[in-house]
Image (cartoon, rainbow, N blue to C red):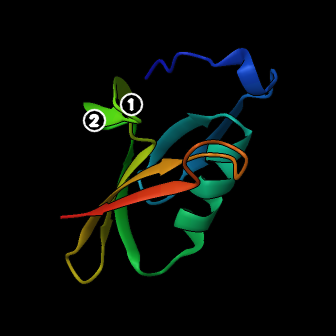
Amino acid sequence: MSIKRNMRYGSNYWESFSPKLNRNVRFSDLEYDHWVLLEANHNVKIFCEQPLRIKHLFNGELAESIFDMWVKYQDGSESFIEVKYSNEAWDKIWLKI
């Protein structure tokens, strides 16, 4: 899977093996830290990186976002997650299905 690199936060780029997905995954620093939490969480059954692109209104303007993760939990619930640094406009968006 090819992931477009965002140079805004530096040049670190992590590639690791995901036991839950049984394949390699690639992330920036912040996404990597979030991935480690998902892998270690026994309540997380499966996940997918950059699963969905959406258009939405933000501060009255049309914006586009790609969620960082889709997560399915052991109890069957699901979340789309956008991870951002705390000094950005959004800290995290959690949309429950």
Judge left or right: residue 96 versus residue 4.
Answer: left
**Residue that label 2 marks:** 52
Q: Name the image quarter holding the N terminus.
A: top left
Front residue of this view, candidates 82 and 26: 82
Image location (x, y in percent) of residue 16: 64, 42
- Which numbered disc, 1 or 2, marks the residue closer to the eye? 1
**Residue that label 1 marks:** 65
Q: Examine the image and state in which quarter residue 20 appears.
A: bottom left
Say which amino acid is labelled 1. Ser
Residue at left offset 27%, top offset 35%: 52
Q: Secondary structure at mark 1?
A: strand
Image location (x, y in percent) of residue 59: 41, 36
Image location (x, y in percent) of residue 83: 55, 49
- Residue 80 appears anywhere in the view: yes
The furthest residue to the front: 60
Q: Residues within 10 Å of mark 2 (few under 14, many from 20)?
A: few
Judge left or right: residue 96 versus residue 90.
Answer: left
Compute the Cα span from label 1 to label 2. 8 Å
Say which amino acid is labelled 2. Leu
Work out whether mark 1 precedes mark 2 in sequence or the reverse, and give the earlier one.
2
Q: Name the image quarter holding the C terminus.
A: bottom left
Q: Residues within 10 Å of mark 1 (few under 14, many from 20)?
A: few
Judge left or right: residue 76 versus residue 68.
Answer: left
Judge left or right: residue 56 versus residue 68.
Answer: left
Residue at left offset 41%, top offset 81%: 43
Front residue of this view, candidates 4 and 88: 88
- Residue 53 appears anywhere in the view: no
Q: Secondary structure at mark 2?
A: loop
